[in-house]
Image (cartoon, helix red, strand yellow):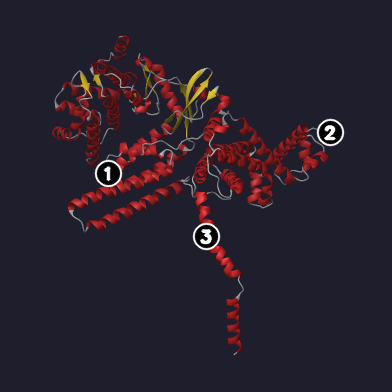
């Protein structure tokens, strides 16, 4: 019996596709080495850069062939591998686009396979054309028992391809890591990806936020577990517009501030009250609704933190805001596994050189009672660059790096990037009071009190 | 006594279902028409009347599934708004879904066709009529609606598509992935290629190229070869001369 071997489905075939790209990368490098002998210094730099762009494009092209999960992997890699040449990161960010579209024939099939009945029979009505794209799939509008639902559908075969994609990427990226250990990064990526392709995992996250996060201005959709599977997620439909459409209405400063404030506060409320945050501040995940309410969707990427970690994290940030001496700060970083134990002098030196630029960025927002992103519209750019610098320096030293700490900082920066787009001004008093309340262990009482205001 | 069309169809369906069940249980070789008749609750003469031999039963099964597919497609709301690619893909998926219920039976047929050659693939051609008819209609509508340009060899395309469909079934039979996801992706990607071919003018261009080559080179070559074999005769004479001298 025959099988079409030309389609990259097996890991071996996938390996071949990428292998071809690696071969090409090698050839590109060789070509420039030959040219380099004959060119000036300045030209050399230019050549190196253009080679990097070509290589980056090659790598991305072959990932594109792997379809499905790969684009998601690429994004994660871009975030987690600061030592990749900037050209690669740029090329990866460009491919932020969506997975292949699921046409009507496939939508029918997936619904029938997952729910046991064709969409037109299962639902009172079902729009076979999607109204939005989602991570690894797309979203459809449906009517079920008189309720308006958003049905998220996953592209078939996505989950299956994670394993082989990760294997290939690890192989390809080890080359750029130059002997650095990337196991922990790959582990983190693979774990988050497995969570992300399992819609039931997302459903339980969504349900948790729906039941436990009460904010007068935030609407979280309700999950319908009886219609949800690993590949289909049904939740109530949230009516509104996205960030781009919202900004196109030329909203007033007051309105923009209002929405940014909701997002900013909710990050700290959920972090300290629920010990988890919505960690995917993609503009598409927030819906601007009528009555100044904000809808929060897509809980595929939720970061959970341990209480002990949160306590150290909070103590440190309060110390930074209050401006205590370096020695105390260093001790607190030590507790967070951001610095290895050495003599105090050595630790302070390492702190000043490597980590301090990062915490300057963090507290810049909190020093005053408000922060205006319209005036500081390069904030998130500076922030991301600083994080990359810190990660690089730390990877080159023997010091370890607390992934969780970096992850939270990076997520927060993602939110700040939104505020920049909105040109909003935020108040930081409330967030700071949450932090102080948490430190004084009165947090729960405090939340209730504040929410009633 | 006259038997109505629908009663006939019902009996036929009953016999086919019985044969599927029995063949899954005992294998094609070991299931006799007699037993199938018993299982279906019909008399021996009746079964021979519908299916003179077991092979005919297999064809009957395939034809019946094609007819079922057509009925399912008819029931889809807004099916006429689907693109040609979506319509064709739905046909394939529907067909496979029907086969899924009798997968073991279909595997046996495929085994006979591809491995033991108990059945010749040519004989399967006899079953394709309904399938080809469905595809043909989809194509006609798409051309009429100006969704695609009239492709060359238009009347052969439904037949090609049937060949492709057989390849899909063969792939599905060998597919060991969970919920046959590989087949789903195989169909989706290969339909992407077919779509690209149908929607672009590649086929037209290719046929233009073919016609050009045919007219300018092949035809003139044919002329040359069909002309009196002067050159050949000449050589022959020369050779003869050599030999004789």
Residue under pointer 1: A85
- How far apart in space, not on screen, are marks 1 and 3 (Cα)? 51 Å
How packed mark 1 is, by other alpha carbons closer than 10 Å (few <14, some 14-19, many 20 or more), is some
Q: From the viewer's side, name the closer residue of A67 and B30.
A: A67
Which structural element holds mark 1?
loop
Which structural element holds mark 3?
helix
Q: Earlier in the sequence, mark 3 or mark 2?
A: 2
Residue B66, picture quadrant: top right
Is residue A299 visible from the viewing direction of this image?
yes
**Image mark 2: chain:** B
| Nearest-to-viewer mark from 1 and 2 | 2
Q: From the viewer's side, name the closer residue of B57 and A123.
A: A123
- How far from the left and from the top, in percent, is residue B48? 80, 42
Residue under pointer 3: B213
Residue under pointer 2: B2
Residue that appears at 40% across and 40% down: A70
- How far from the left and from the top, in percent, is residue A150? 46, 24
Left or right relative to A253: residue A105: right
- Vertical comparison of B222 with A55: above or below: below
Left or right relative to A266: residue A389: left
- How far apart in space, not on screen, are marks 1 and 2 (Cα)? 83 Å
- How far from the left and from the top, in percent, is residue A3? 54, 49
How packed mark 3 is, by other alpha carbons closer than 10 Å (few <14, some 14-19, many 20 or more), is few
């Amino acid at each position: 019996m025959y099988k079409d071997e030309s389609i990259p489905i097996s890991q071996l075939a996938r390996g071949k596709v990428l292998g071809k790209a690696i071969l090409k990368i090698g050839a590109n490098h060789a070509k420039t080495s030959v040219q380099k002998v004959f060119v000036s210094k300045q030209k050399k730099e230019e050549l190196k850069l253009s080679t990097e762009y070509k290589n980056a494009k090659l790598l991305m092209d072959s990932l594109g062939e792997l379809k499905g999960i790969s684009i998601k992997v690429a994004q994660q890699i871009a975030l987690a591998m600061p030592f990749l040449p900037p050209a690669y990161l740029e090329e990866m960010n460009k491919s932020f686009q969506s997975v292949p579209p699921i046409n009507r024939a496939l939508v029918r099939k997936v619904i029938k396979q997952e729910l046991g009945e064709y969409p037109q029979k299962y639902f009172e009505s079902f729009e076979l054309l999607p109204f939005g794209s989602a991570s690894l799939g797309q979203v459809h509008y449906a009517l079920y028992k008189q309720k308006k639902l958003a049905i998220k559908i996953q592209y078939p075969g996505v989950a299956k391809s994670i394993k082989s994609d990760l294997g290939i990427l690890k192989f390809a990226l080890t080359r750029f890591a130059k002997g650095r250990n990337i196991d922990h990064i790959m582990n983190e990526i693979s774990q988050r990806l497995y969570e992300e392709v399992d819609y039931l995992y997302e459903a339980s996250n969504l349900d948790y936020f729906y039941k436990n996060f009460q904010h007068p201005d935030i609407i979280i959709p309700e999950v319908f577990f009886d219609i949800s599977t690993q590949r289909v997620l049904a939740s109530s439909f949230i009516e509104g517009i996205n960030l781009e459409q919202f900004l196109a209405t030329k909203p007033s400063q007051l309105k923009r501030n209002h929405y940014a404030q909701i997002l900013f506060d909710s990050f700290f409320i959920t972090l300290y009250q629920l010990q988890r945050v919505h960690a995917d501040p993609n503009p598409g995940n927030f819906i601007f609704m009528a009555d100044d309410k904000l809808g929060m969707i897509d809980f595929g990427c939720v970061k959970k933190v341990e209480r002990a970690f949160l306590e150290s994290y909070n103590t440190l940030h309060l110390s930074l805001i209050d401006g205590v001496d370096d020695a105390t700060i260093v001790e607190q970083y030590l507790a967070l596994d951001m610095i290895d134990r050495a003599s105090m002098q050595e630790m302070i030196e390492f702190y000043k050189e490597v980590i301090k630029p990062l915490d300057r960025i963090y507290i810049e927002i909190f020093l005053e009672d408000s922060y205006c992103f319209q005036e500081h519209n390069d904030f998130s750019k500076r922030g991301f660059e600083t994080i990359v610098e810190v990660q690089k320096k730390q990877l080159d030293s023997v010091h370890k790096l607390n992934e969780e700490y970096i992850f939270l900082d990076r997520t927060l920066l993602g939110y700040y990037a939104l505020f920049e787009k909105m040109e909003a001004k935020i108040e930081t008093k409330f967030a700071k009071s949450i932090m102080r309340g948490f430190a004084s262990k009165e947090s729960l009482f405090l939340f209730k009190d504040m929410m009633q205001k | 006594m006259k038997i109505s069309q629908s009663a006939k169809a019902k009996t036929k369906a009953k016999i086919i279902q019985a044969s599927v069940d029995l063949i899954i249980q005992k294998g094609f070789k070991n299931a006799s028409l007699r037993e199938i008749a018993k299982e279906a609750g019909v008399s021996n003469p009746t079964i021979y009347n519908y299916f003179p031999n077991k092979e005919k039963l297999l064809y009957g099964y395939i034809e019946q599934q094609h007819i079922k597919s057509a009925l399912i497609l008819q029931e889809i709301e807004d099916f006429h708004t689907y693109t040609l690619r979506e319509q064709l893909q739905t046909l394939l998926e529907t067909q496979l879904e029907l086969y899924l219920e009798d997968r073991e039976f279909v595997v046996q047929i495929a085994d006979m066709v591809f491995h033991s050659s108990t059945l010749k693939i040519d004989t399967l051609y006899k079953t394709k009529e309904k399938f080809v008819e469905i595809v043909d209609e989809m194509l006609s509508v798409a051309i009429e609606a100006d969704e695609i340009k009239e492709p060359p060899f238009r009347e052969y395309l439904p037949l090609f598509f049937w060949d492709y469909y057989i390849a899909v079934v063969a792939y599905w039979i060998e597919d060991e992935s969970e919920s046959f996801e590989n087949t789903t992706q195989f169909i989706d990607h290969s339909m992407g290629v077919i779509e690209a071919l149908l929607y672009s003018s590649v086929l037209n261009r290719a046929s233009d190229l073919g016609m050009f080559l045919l007219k300018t080179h092949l035809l003139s070559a044919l002329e040359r070869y069909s002309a009196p074999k002067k050159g050949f005769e000449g050589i022959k004479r020369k050779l003869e001369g050599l030999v004789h001298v």
